[in-house]
Image: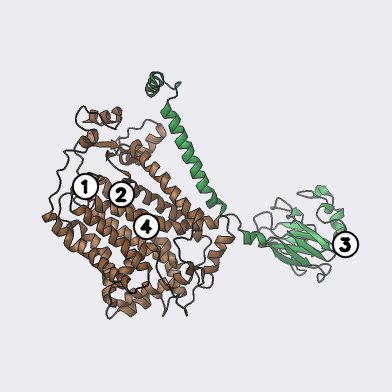
Chain colours: A brown, B green
Amino acid sequence: MAGLYKSDYENPVIRWIDTRLPIFSLMQKEYGTFPTPRNFNYFWNFGALALVTLVIMMATGIFLAMNYSPNTGLAFDSVQRIMRDVNYGWLLRYTHQNGASMFFMVVYIHIFRGFYYGSYKYPRELLWMIGVVILLLMMATAFMGYVLPWGQMSYWGATVITNLFSAIPVIGQTVVTWLWGGFSVDNPTLNRFFSLHYLLPFVLFGVVFLHVVALHITGSNNPLGIEVKTPQDTLPFHPYYTIKDSVGLCVFLIVFAVFVFFVPHTLGDPNNFIPANPLQTPADIVPEWYFLPFYAILRSVPNKLGGVTLMFASILVLFVLPWLDTSPVRSARFRPLYRPFIFVLVLSLFALGAVGAHKPEGLWVVLGRVCTAYYFLHFLVILPVLGVLERPLPLPESISRPVLGPPGGGGPMPAGAAAKPMEKS
Amino acid sequence: MAEPLAAATTAQHGQPDIVSKRDFLKLVTISGAAIGAGAFAWPFIASMNPSRDVLALSSVEVDLTPVQAGQGITVVWRGKPIFVRHRTEAEIKEAVDTPLQAMIEPVPDADRVKPGHAQWIVVIGICTHLGCVPLGNKPTDPRGDYGGWFCPCHGSQYDTAGRVRHGPAPLNLFLPPYAFESDTKIRIG
């Protein structure tokens, strides 16, 4: 059998394929028997939810592109045609439009999970950094997608965001002209944004694949933040976590459906129902909710280059987070000082969101500056210092002990489930 | 509770005649997921069917007054060419008199036109072989040996009733749905 993969499958057709291309064995290893910490809570659903959302976005996007015209003269009307004339076009578009919000909601919770349970720490630093790349790609894709309907917010969003690059000293204006393909946001800009908006999700999918590969090398973190020690600490991914993910997915799809079917415009901006007008900026221009905190950071600095730099730095700082956090303990459950600070960070991000949604006047300016300062203070000062000052609570001996309780005490897991991995060891 | 538990245990040991609770749950879960996937796929597939604005363009009115005997005009209906031809007395006579045995798809001339309007033949101008547009609508075009239409792609020939008389086309030119609104006006679609 030289040259063939040694397959355990007995079905002749599956075996024929599997010995030549072991996809069945691979799936069984990575998603069937894959040993997964037994103590996941529902925060561990959000990676799977994000993947499902990405697939939904790609599917709806491909079908929307069949009816969309990336031309300044046609774009707005072609979107209205999708809403009125194309069969279920309203459903495809509302799903895609609200799907962007759902995607960010899921991914932000996924990132919070990483913050709270220290998922970015050794040995998962690269896994985390790939995640930050995913976030950046998502932001670029979401921004370019928002331009496509060619409403007022599309046009002025595109103008403002591309003008961020004009803050670069010396070459700024040249870069912006290059991004536009002209001297203002116009047809060439719309064309390239459509092309890139179609391309980037596939790049995103590839990077997500790397994210999953890296995850399957280190294995998942868990709510206790301690490493898996024995097979008793794990459960096979299927059926335990396929089912747990399915439960979460059902709840998530209900939330998604409520937005799509009942309040499809709640998260959008009414100004985008007005066709783009290069001669008139809307009076109250705000980005979509998922960009508000970053927009608030941008506006908090009374200097063009400074604001743009801090806004980009607020994401880039996440790349070095694994090294800024000096504590060896992952989970916030055992970090009495880190725990309140992470909630302050979340609070400041919500506050920044509120600041971004209001006109920069009076108290909002002060609040924006305080929260921006805290954001960077948290990562650059508090985290490195906490690792030295904090006295963590004692860590449990293993994952299975706090789950199963003291020996002989019984636990919430079915006996068969507990016994099976034990046999293997 | 002892009874079903024992049954479940035996089922797991490979006795197919006993259905366990887990088998039932599996079946319900998979069926539910399959129905969900189907319901999810439906709008995607439906979105590729003709949209409302395309369907709204599905009828067209044609004024016949300017078309002289022996001439034909081409109008567009649903993106397809429709041949509207005003036949001469001689052409009608020949079309009516041709024996059915001489045809590839035998249809009497009366079934190709509307009663009382034998001078008007209205057909979809797409060759039933591979979809080319036959020549012959203009008097200057080649009309083939049967005086109707001649397809330049593979040489199929049609008579003045749009019936195929020479292959490779297998069928007569299709008739669009149409009606006479008055003696000089038709509505196609």
The subunit letter for the residue under badge 2 reads: A
Circle 4 sits on which residue? A104
Circle 2 sits on which residue? A212
The kind of secondary structure element at disc 4 is helix
The subunit letter for the residue under badge 3 reads: B
Residue type pointed to by label 4: Phe
The one of A105 and A33 positioned closer to us in this rendering: A105
Q: Are marks 3 and 2 in contact (CB under 8 Å)?
A: no
The kind of secondary structure element at disc 3 is helix
Q: CA distance from mark 4 to mark 3?
A: 75 Å
Picture quarter with the N terminus of chain B: top left
Can residue A65 be seen here? The reply is yes
Q: CA distance from mark 1 to mark 4?
A: 26 Å
In the rendered image, the vertical position of residue A143 relative to residue A104, given as above or below: below
Say few, some or many: other residues with alpha carbon within 10 Å of mark 3 (under 14 / 14 to 19 / 20 or more): few
Q: Which mark is residue A333?
A: 1
A178 lies left or right of B27: left
Q: CA distance from mark 3 to mark 1?
A: 99 Å
Q: Are marks 2 and 4 in contact (CB under 8 Å)?
A: no
Q: Which mark is residue A43?
A: none
The label nearer to you, 1 versus 4, is 1
The subunit letter for the residue under badge 1 reads: A
Q: CA distance from mark 1 to mark 2?
A: 26 Å
